[in-house]
Amino acid sequence: MFAVIKTGGKQYRVAKGDVVVVEKLDAKAGAKVSFDTLMSSDGKAVKLGKDAGKVTGELVETKKGDKVFVFKKRRRNTYRRRAGHRQAESHVKITAIG
C-alpha cells in the first residue's frame, strides 16, 4: 500500500515505514504529524482526494541539510562572490496510511 502526500509545496510517494525528508515542519521530535493525501492505492483500487484517507507520521528529527554553494563570477573583472546555504529539513517516519 502506498500514498501520495503533499507538504511544503512538493509531492512525495510514501509507504508505511518509510522515512521521508521534507521541508521543515513546526513540531518537536516525536510529535505526530498528518499530511494532505492526494492519492492512495492498495494494489487493487486507487482512491483520490478526500476518499484517499489520512497519512500520519512521527517526526524523527529536524536539522539542516547539506550545504549548497552559490558562486558568481564576471570574467576579466575582479568580481567573485561565494555564498553558502543550508536548508532546514525534517525527517518523518510514516506510521499509518488510511
Image (cartoon, helix red, strand yellow):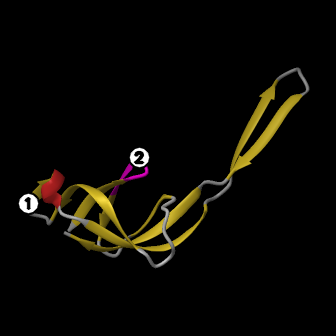
In the rendered image, residue 63, in percent from the top left (x then y), is placed at 60, 66
Q: Nearer the viewer, mark 1 or mark 2?
A: 2
Q: Is residue 2 magenta?
A: no
Kindly indicate the quadrant of the structure image that contains residue 72: top right
The residues tagged by marks 1 and 2 sit, at their Cα atoms, a distance apart of 26 Å
Location of the N terminus by quadrant is bottom left
Q: Which residue is mark 1?
A: 45
Q: Which residue is mark 2?
A: 9
The rendered magenta stretch, by its main secondary structure, is classed as strand
The span shown in magenta is 7-12
Find out whether the residues at labels 1 and 2 contact each other: C-beta distance under 8 Å.
no
- Looking at the rendered structure, the kind of residue marked 2 is Gly
Q: Residue furthest left?
A: 44
The residue at 46%/79% (across/down) is 30
At label 1, counting other C-alpha atoms closer than 10 Å, the crowd grade (few under 14, some 14-19, many 20 or more) is few
The residue at 32%/61% (across/down) is 35
Q: Secondary structure at mark 2?
A: loop
- Looking at the rendered structure, the kind of residue marked 1 is Ala
First-in-chain label (1 vs 2): 2
At label 2, counting other C-alpha atoms closer than 10 Å, the crowd grade (few under 14, some 14-19, many 20 or more) is few
